Image: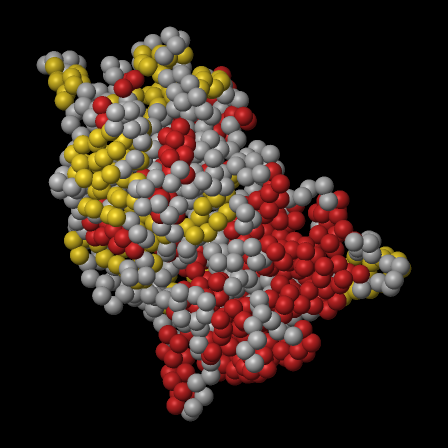
Amino acid sequence: MTRTSTWQQILDPSHRADPYPLYTELRKTPVVRVEDGTYVVSTYREIVSLLHDPRLSSDARNLPEVGADVAAQYEEGLPGLPPNFIRTDPPEHDRLRRLLTRNFGPPHRPERIDGMMSDLLGIVTRLIDDFTGEDGSGTVRVDIVDDFAYPFPVTVICELLGVPREDEPRFQVMSGAVIETADPTTGGIVERQRRRAKAVADLGQYFAQLLDARHGRRGDDLLSGLLSGDSDEAPMSREEILSNAALLLVAGHETTVNLVTNGMLTLLRHPEVLDRLRRGDEPDLAAHVVEELLRYEPPVQFLSSGRNTLDDIEIAGTTIPKGSPVALVLASGSRDPGFVTDPDRFDPDREHNEHLGFGGGIHYCFGAPLARPETQIALTQLAHRLKNPRLVADPPPYRTSPSLRGPRHLLIEIDGVDPA
Amino acid sequence: MKVVVDLTRCQGYAQCAFAAPDVFVIQGDEALLYDTEPDDAQREKIVRAAAACPVQAIFLDRDDTRDDTRIQEPAPETHVAAPGPGEAFKRTGRIVIVGASLAGLRAGRTLRQEGFTGSLTVIGDEPHAPYDRPPLSKQVLMGQVPARRTGLPRRDELDAHWRFGVAATGLDLSGKQVLLADGEKVEFDRLLIATGVRARPWPNEAEAALDGLFALRTPEDAEGLRQRLAAGPGRVLVIGAGFTGCEVASACRELDLRVTVLERGPAPLAGALGAVIGGVAAQMQRDNGVDLRCGVRVESLEGDDSGRLRRARLSDGSTLDVEVAVAALGSIRNVEWLEGSGLAAGAWGVACDAGCRAVDVNGLVTDDVFVAGDVARCPHPVYDYQYLALEHWGNAVAQAGIAAHNMISTQSERWPHLALPEFWSTQFGTEIKSVGVPTHADHVVIAQGSVAERRFVAVYGYRGRITAAVAFNQAKWLEFYAGLIDRAAPFPPSFRTVDRPTDGHPVAAEVPERPTPQATVVVTGHGPSERRATLVRRTYL
């Protein structure tokens, strides 16, 4: 087995259920150049180092072939939307993220997420109530994905952004198209960038209609906040708002679904932890379960979209030449035995869990402060209320994406639901 | 419950402030201020905040089910063999730590974590259990945290004999005894000196006694000053614009008090960061409404008949009417108790080797006496083997850990203290972080970001290699520059990065010429077996 073929196998959907042995293989060469010219980095220290390395750009337009194509598209009159903040570098990145944070968290709205806790619990409670009939008894089959882990974060992100929940069928298709472009097996980097620009533009179009339909009415949602410009710096342009709103909608419901689902699957595979969570006598447990999940079964397996080197970077004995695309395999780094003891064991009691589940550096996951309580509440409530939950199939069927990895369905059987 | 955040590790991700917004507060982009002893009702949120910290920098007290072993270095590979003399010492030895603050506490914990089961005595001259000082010039002055509620988490588990409120007054090296102010003698097999520093007092004794003049080092200092600030004085005078002075000025502005800062040097923070970056700090102060006057000294302080501070006469001939003044004049190392002990202890601190073993007056390394924290001065290979005395929180933690490890290790298992110096300061909603030694520099260049927006990384160089980096609100990049210092990378950095300023040319760093503290030593004797040094004059001030 050659090294390059290890990466191909990781990308191959047939290995989606358990890529971890392949990561072990991959880590034998911490930095490896794969077929499409991407440098794949798989060890903890090297990933952390690159996450903090200012020679690594997140703006794909710095790649010569992408930059040329963007210019060509512009010539063709198809400039599309400006890149969202995770695909930009400072100072642009810092400005956009600061404006987004203004309506999301500290320093300006520190209580916002904390204030959502009872709403989150309410949504989770209703979804679990609906698993069974009125009396909550009888053996039923539930799809944790379609019946729970997908609708929950979608409802939350819609409320937060100010998007009508009933539009979900519309934007789900567009969002799926965006997600697909993150999968390296679906095409070359330039082709995927083009496809992505089109998909984002569609989603942006949806948001444009949404804004127009509001006729300037403002609420407490993020979109309203972005428009209002109550800041000491200029608000985002309309195009920037459309681009970043599209990102938040996609990220807000394509990632948490996998974290929650991976979490339930992992708990069902580790019944002793599920039992502890069900007993409820360890108030700190849920937080540590979620952090360990982010290490052990993270929803984002690797970061690849557009990261590239602005200069030669020498790392782990390899020189990544200037202008190379770089993929950081977070899920592999978090299981690197060079940094984590007993990495393949799911252990919520692990001390000092400095995982890479949400990345690191300036692009650290924007939605992390929301995804954490969402998952803590979701898993705690599932553990508390489901009677005798058991897997129907193990492994479950997976989505195709190797980077945003999670089950497509997670069928379980339960003997009823306890009241909330 | 008690909370302490290792702000050397913190990179301003703000995850704690999302999870427990009543306890952790972010100012500006990434400056974190937190409640050091929050209500137990917040416990669940605080535990979530600590779990969520991406760099695991939040530590809670023993009620928490989690431990913070991360401060501890990975245990050395131990070979299972017949217990040697080292093993016997680990089981039944007697260790005395003089100094019951951050370094002393950390050392004690490391000793226990690494399996020391012998007797442990910790001696501290203050009446308090170990407490954390950084909040005293920030949260405490702003009235967010009571001065006596900055206790460091978890001391009970140490199984130590604590002697609070009694100072060590002497050291008998040959008799292996520490002498205490109450006349007691405490015997030791191994000793750790961690007596730290104290605030440099106002030099004129009569003026120093004026009511309204404060130093800032202890909880008593902070409480007294806080009360005066809370009473809303017409103006506060801060004398000295080092980190403490700047943070006091920041707290005053936070409280909407008028504040004048006098700095006899060219700029605030110039002593630590050089006058170029000090100039940025100066602009930051002025933008925040501080009346900053550089190149000016206080000639005298004047009081009224009841001994209350009323006026300051300045070296530029002007006067200022003030009721409250803070003398932020730097520090003095607590070494008087070591006079005559035979150790190389003086105004410069207590010299030790990179393994924290104390050096005696002849320059010989001792075997059983170790030094850590603010009072220690040890050679750093990265800085031309110069002896560095570092009054940094992170250094106290790291050096105490190394010292403790070495105290219970055999020669071949001992570690050198080679951590790069790091420190931070939170002022005017800006997080200033430094790695390396910015004063070990001839040039400085803005490598990333914007000085005008006060989010930038400045890189310092000495004779063509990178020796330090200072970030204003850009903490997430700093570990990259630490790596460059470790690798002795060439200065100025020539590679392309994100956010590279267009006008990034190196300029002279303008770091202060610092005279080496004078030690007067007389050497006597002729042959190699006779030559001995003696310290003949104390120069503590």
Q: Is residue A272 left or right of residue B331?
A: right
Viewport quadrant of the N terminus of chain B: top right
**Residue B495, percent across and down?**
28, 64
In the rendered image of this protein, does residue B500 appear above or below residue A206? above
Identified at 32% across, 42% down, the residue is: B234
Extreme residue toward the front, this view: B305
Residue B209, picture quadrant: top left
In the rendered image of this protein, does residue A77 appear above or below residue A102? below
**Residue B182, percent across and down?**
39, 10
Q: Is residue B532 left or right of residue A83?
A: left
**Residue B226, percent across and down?**
40, 36
Extreme residue toward the top, this view: B183
Identified at 54% across, 53% down, the residue is: B18
In the rendered image of this protein, does residue A243 appear above or below residue B254? below
Identified at 44% across, 68% down, the residue is: A96
Specify whether residue A92 is in view. yes
Closer to the camera in the image, A103 or B424? A103
